[in-house]
Image (cartoon, rainbow, N blue to C red):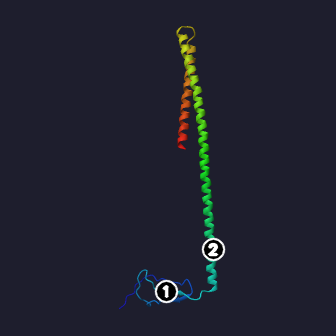
Amino acid sequence: RFAVVNAPVLTVRAPINGVIRMPTQGLAAPVTRDQVLFDLAATQTSRAEIARLRSEAAARDAEAMALMAEERNAGQIVTALRRRVVVETESELVFLSRKLEEARADRQLHEIAWDRAQAEFRRIDDLVKRGRIPAKELDEAVFRRAEAEAELTSDDARISALRVEIEAI
């Protein structure tokens, strides 16, 4: 009394010419997963097979050489890019440092202009209080002082922005 299990049937094909050394236990013999069913020993390998294998080995060697050359080339590109980043970073730092020096110099000039505007405001304010010049002159002095103060605020903002850029690098 036998039962038949409807299971997939696998076909195994020999990759080389040869002889089965350890024969199977026969048809319908039970097997387990990863069990060696038989050994295939190569007999005479044809010259065509040897030539094909040598050709395949040569092709793989050529691929390996090409990949190594590509890897070397990629390494050289990465090294060149790293050098370029360093040069560009140093150049950017020099440029931003010069801009910062320029902004500080502008601020010093605008401080002098503000001091002058402040002194002029005081002088005109005193003259207006004594009735020597019209009050309209005081309005213009207030405007010049406010303008000089706005220049200082602008310079401070520019200096701060440049410092942030330099620190970011």
Image quadrant where residue 78 sits: bottom right
The residue at the far top in this view is 131
Which quarter shows the N terminus?
A: bottom left
Is residue 10 positioned above or below 109 on the image?
below
Mark 1 or 2 closer to N-term? 1
**Residue 143 visible in rendering:** no
Inspect the image, locate mark 1, and give the three-letter code of the amino acid beneath it.
Answer: Asp
Residue at point 58%, 23% (across, down) = 112
Is residue 73 positioned above or below 33 on the image?
above
Image quadrant where residue 101 sits: top right
Which quarter shows the C terminus?
A: top right
Foreground residue among 6 and 96: 96
Inspect the image, locate mark 2, and give the three-letter code of the amino acid beneath it.
Answer: Ala
Q: Secondary structure at mark 1?
A: loop
Q: Secondary structure at mark 2?
A: helix
The residue at the far left in this view is 1
Residue at point 63%, 67% (across, down) = 66
Q: Which mark is residue 59?
A: 2
Residue at point 61%, 76% (across, down) = 57
- For the residues labelled 1 and 2, the Cα–Cα distance comes to 29 Å
Where residue 25 appears, as percent x and y from the top left, is 43, 90
Residue that badge 1 annotates: 39
Where residue 10 appears, as percent x and y from the top left, is 48, 82
Image quadrant where residue 109 sits: top right
Q: For label 2, count other residues whose C-alpha is less than 10 Å away and answer few (under 14), some (14-19) or many (20+).
A: few
